[in-house]
């Protein structure tokens, strides 16, 4: 399994286009894994919940 850290808008757009799951990590704990519904400069929405880009780590799997 290839894992890629996501931080750029193009990373999140790629995950939407290719239907790739994203893991959301907060303080080195996995919070959720799912598909990105939308994203802004401030947050990423996965399964109806917004996760702030400034305090979360996003990994494409």
Image: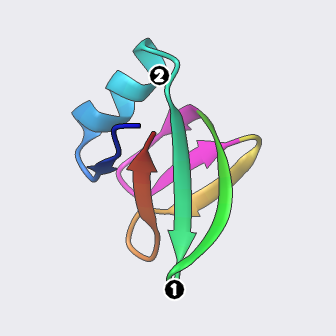
Residue placed at 42% from the left, 27% from the top? 15
Q: Position of residue 38 (x, y in %)?
A: 54, 33
Residue placed at 47% from the left, 40% from the top? 39
Which residues fall within the magenta stretch? Answer: 36-46
Q: Local crowd at mark 1 within 10 Å, few (<14), some, or many (≥20)? A: few
Which residue is under mark 2? Answer: 16
Q: Main secondary structure of the magenta part?
A: strand
Judge whether residue 25 is colored magenta: no
Q: Position of residue 59 (x, y in %)?
A: 41, 52
| Marks 1/2: CA–CA distance | 25 Å
Left or right, residue 29 beside residue 20: right
**Dot placed on the residue nearer the N-terminal end, 1 or 2:** 2
Instruction: In the displayed orientation, state which residue is furthest to the right.
Output: 48
The quarter of the picture where residue 36 lies is: top right
Residue placed at 37% from the left, 35% from the top? 12
Disc 2, SS: helix
Instruction: In the displayed orientation, state which residue is furthest to the bottom.
Output: 27
Q: Nearer the viewer, residue 28 or 37?
A: 28
- Location of the N terminus (image quadrant): top left
Residue 27's disc is 1
Q: Position of residue 27 (x, y in %)?
A: 51, 86
Residue 8's disc is none
Left or right, residue 18 beside residue 31: left
Instruction: In the displayed orientation, state which residue is furthest to the top.
Output: 17
| Front disc: 1 or 2 | 1
- Location of the C terminus (image quadrant): top left
Disc 1, SS: loop
Relative to residue 54, is residue 38 depicted above or below? above
Q: How is the image coloured?
A: rainbow
Left or right, residue 42 beside residue 8: right
Q: Nearer the viewer, residue 50 or 32?
A: 32
Q: Local crowd at mark 2 within 10 Å, few (<14), some, or many (≥20)? A: some
């Amino acid at each position: 399994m290839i894992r890629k850290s996501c931080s750029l808008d193009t990373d999140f757009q790629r995950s939407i286009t290719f239907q790739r799951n994203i893991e959301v990590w907060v303080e080195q704990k996995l919070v959720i894994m799912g598909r990105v519904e939308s994203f802004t400069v401030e947050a990423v929405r996965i399964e109806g919940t917004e996760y702030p880009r400034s305090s979360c780590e996003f990994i494409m799997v």
